[in-house]
Image (cartoon, grey):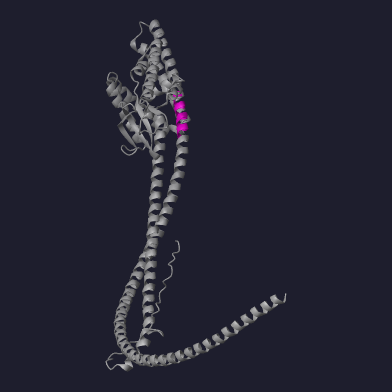
Amino acid sequence: MKIWELLVLTIQWTLETWVLLLAGAGIFLLAALLTVLQQASSRRVLWQQLQDSRLRENDHGHQLDKARADVERLEWELDEAREELHRQQAQGRDYLQQFHQAEKQREALRASWQALGGQLRELQQANQSLQDERRTLASKHAALQTSLQEREAHYREQLQQLDDNRQVLAREFENLANRIFEEKGQSFARSSQSSMDALLKPFREQIESFQKRVNEVHDAALQGNASLSAEIRKVLETGMQMSADAHSLVAALKGDAQQRGAWGEAQLKRTLELGGLVEGQHYQVQTSFRDEQGRLKQTDFLINLPDGKHLVIDSKVTLNAYEQLVTAQAQEEKKRALGAHLQAVRRHVDELAEKDYSSLPGVHTPGFVLMFMPVEPAFIEALREDRDLYEYALRKNVMLVSHTTLVPVLRTVSSLWMLERSQQEAREISDRAGDIYNQVCLVAERLARLGNTLGTASNHYNSVVTSLAGQQGLHGKVERFARLSARISKDMPVLEPRHPDFETGRLQLDEA
């Protein structure tokens, strides 16, 4: 145990000895290192002082060169500033000239705008007047339609009364004639040997009695229809004229179908003109179309309606059978002629229905075709004897019309065109007013842009003046050159910002 303790103590002493030796060597080395470092630091200080001295000499030379360069640069900047000043002054004069020109343009545009505003108000007043006139015309049209219907009813009553009076006169005439001839025969049998004066005396008396009776009936009719005499006379004259025309044409039209067709078309054209329609504007004659199979079809008369609609009217003359009906003496003969007349009318209806004008491309009809019968009595006779004829034609999309029934339809078409023309004029005035208003808006926009341009030019000028003559401007920076240089021969002009006395804000227009 003691041996190990001695061994440990020996090792411990040995280690402590080595530590002391190493510490002494380190202290020596540290002292030597400090000495070397101190000497090196002294050298660096001396070297640094030498370098600083050299740098100060170089800095003085550089500062001198820099001062010279600054003087040259400042002289160059002064020349540039003078040139820039001249340019800015020229630009300012240009801006000022543009400002005066723009102000003149603004005055001219303001006068033009006022004139356009006056025209707009006048057009609005004209538009209002046309609207009032259109409403007045519409009211008058409605009143005329009502008056026309009342007049037609009145005429029908007059015709019925006239027909009744004519039948009464016919019966009276027939009774008187029979009585006269009967008395004349009896008198002739009793007094066959009497003189001629005695034979003619009863006949003369009967004639006078008949004349007196006719006058009495006529006076009674005149007294009962005093308020309607003028209207009845016109109707009678029209009927007599139509009857005379019909009879004068019977002989010429009986055997020539082409001539009958031409006459019927002429009568239809006359009816269209009486209805207030104009050829080429409201209707076309003999217009040709091709159906879906390419077959050519031709309408007698094509009536134009507003909104691109049409009415097709075809003239059909049924004259031969009706002439036989009028001239027939025997009842059986009249019956056969009446049947032939009705068959002819139905045949014309079937032929017109087969043409199917309403399905033609480019023809926009309401679904039916008007069949015009120019002979008014033939039309009336057919409808009176065949109550189903009108319905038969309607089932085939054919409407039977005559001069009397067609004229109100044509008058209505003419009134529709008048209303359409009034509405078109109103639309044109409205469009024109819109164009004028848009033009005024365009002038206002250009005037606003002109005001903005004037404001921009003024702002640019003020900005240049500020950059040159302001507190931080170029003038303050180069002012000291005037004291340093002997070459200065001009004085800097006084520059001040300009404040325009016109408004450059948004231009607002009050609606008239």
State the residue at coordinates (41%, 51%).
130
Image quadrant containing the N terminus: bottom right
Query: Of 192 and 402, which appears nearest the observer?
Result: 402
Q: In which quarter of the image is residue 42?
A: bottom left
Q: Is 147 placed left or right of 74 in the picture?
A: right
* Residue 98 x %, y %: 32, 74
Q: Can residue 210 be seen in this view?
A: yes
Q: In which quarter of the image is residue 314?
A: top left
Query: Of 342 and 478, which appears nearest the observer?
Result: 478
Q: Can residue 414 be seen in this view?
A: no
Image quadrant containing the C terminus: bottom left
State the residue at coordinates (35%, 15%).
324
User: From what the image shows, is residue 128 above or below residue 243?
Assistant: below
Query: Of 494 and 502, which appears nearest the observer?
Result: 494
**156 in magenta:** yes
**81 in magenta:** no
Q: Residue furthest right?
A: 1
SS assignment for the magenta stretch, majority: helix
Give, as a single range, the part of the protein colored magenta: 151-163
* Residue 408 x %, y %: 42, 34
* Residue 145 x %, y %: 45, 38
Q: In which quarter of the image is residue 209?
A: top left
